[in-house]
Amino acid sequence: LTKYATAVYLPGIAVIGMLLTWNRIRWGAVRQALLIVLSAVAISFFVLVFWAQDLVPGIVSTTTNRTPISPASASLLLTNTATWIGVILILAVFGAALQWRRWPLVLTLLTFSVIGPAQQIRIGEETSLSKHVAFGMVFAAPLAGYLLAWFVARSKWFGVPFAAAALSMQLVLGWTQSQEFLTSWVDDTAVVEALREEIAVSPNKAILGEEPSAQRYALRGEVEPILWTDTFSLNYGNKNGMNAYREAIDQSHFGTIYLSLNTDNGQAINQYLTTGETPYRLSNKVPFTRHGEFAGYYLIWTPKVLAR
């Protein structure tokens, strides 16, 4: 409910609820579905208008007017999606086929199980793909579970081993994928310590970090969340994108800038800091590793007036 994806999935939940209760309360099911959607719209309207108007530009830039943060080819996104949830989707499709008489319900479940990844494949966006894949599995899981239950009910001698094999396969895949996700992060121990020292020199100043999610949590005791800025998007001085970054840099808005050169904006910002006459200097290069092997440097830029 705290993610913008609610705007996609909540109508699906309302439709599913309506279809499940149609035979019992008929048009009452339609009224309840409309009540769910209209209540969500009303709550969102009042929150955004009276409490969080500053969130609107961010929501627009990440939804209706989104530019891919991590562009990727459709083939790569399809491969990742198939690897992560292919088994569950296959089970769900066969489970849906067993309930073809309830086609409006099963079609809705199948549609909302892939609508998130399908949108990301359409726009070529890799960021958050795994998250939206997981959201979709909430809708596919009942169909996959129905198929396994159907096999068990038809023949325990065949159904139980089949269900156990399918679940075991998914357990192994999930375990393997979780290990991959866990170890794909770089070891940021060194840069966290370096940032801690730099932040102590210029406390309460904004920080610009490239993919700073891990560091902002590690340093949550030293830095207020509102002070963190990333290289994905920025609005500053009535400007956005690289123009906003350049103006913020020229005005010494950031107390610390650190870059790994993994994003297009990160590379452009480093180029501007390296070749332009800015009030920042390269104060540190901190190596980082992935899987125990050297993977690059964090480049830390700080204001020249704070040179030690």
Image: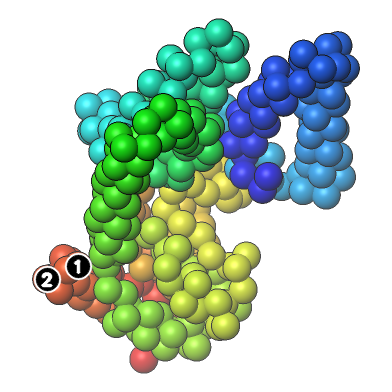
Residue farthest along the bottom direction in this orientation = 308
Q: Do tag 2 and tag 1 residues touch (Cβ < 8 Å)?
A: yes
The residue to which callout 2 is attached is 293
The correct choice, above or below, for 18 with respect to 236 in the image is above
The residue to which callout 1 is attached is 290
SS category of the residue bearing label 2: strand
Residue farthest along the left direction in this orientation = 293
Image coordinates for residue 221, horizontal then vertical, percent: 57, 83
The correct choice, above or below, for 226 with respect to 151 in the image is below
Q: Residue at x 69, y 39 (%)?
A: 56
Residue 7 visible in image: no
Residue 130 in the figure: left or right of residue 104: left
Residue 47 visible in image: yes
Quadrant of image for the C terminus: bottom left
Q: Which mark is residue 174?
A: none
Q: Quadrant of residue 181?
A: bottom left
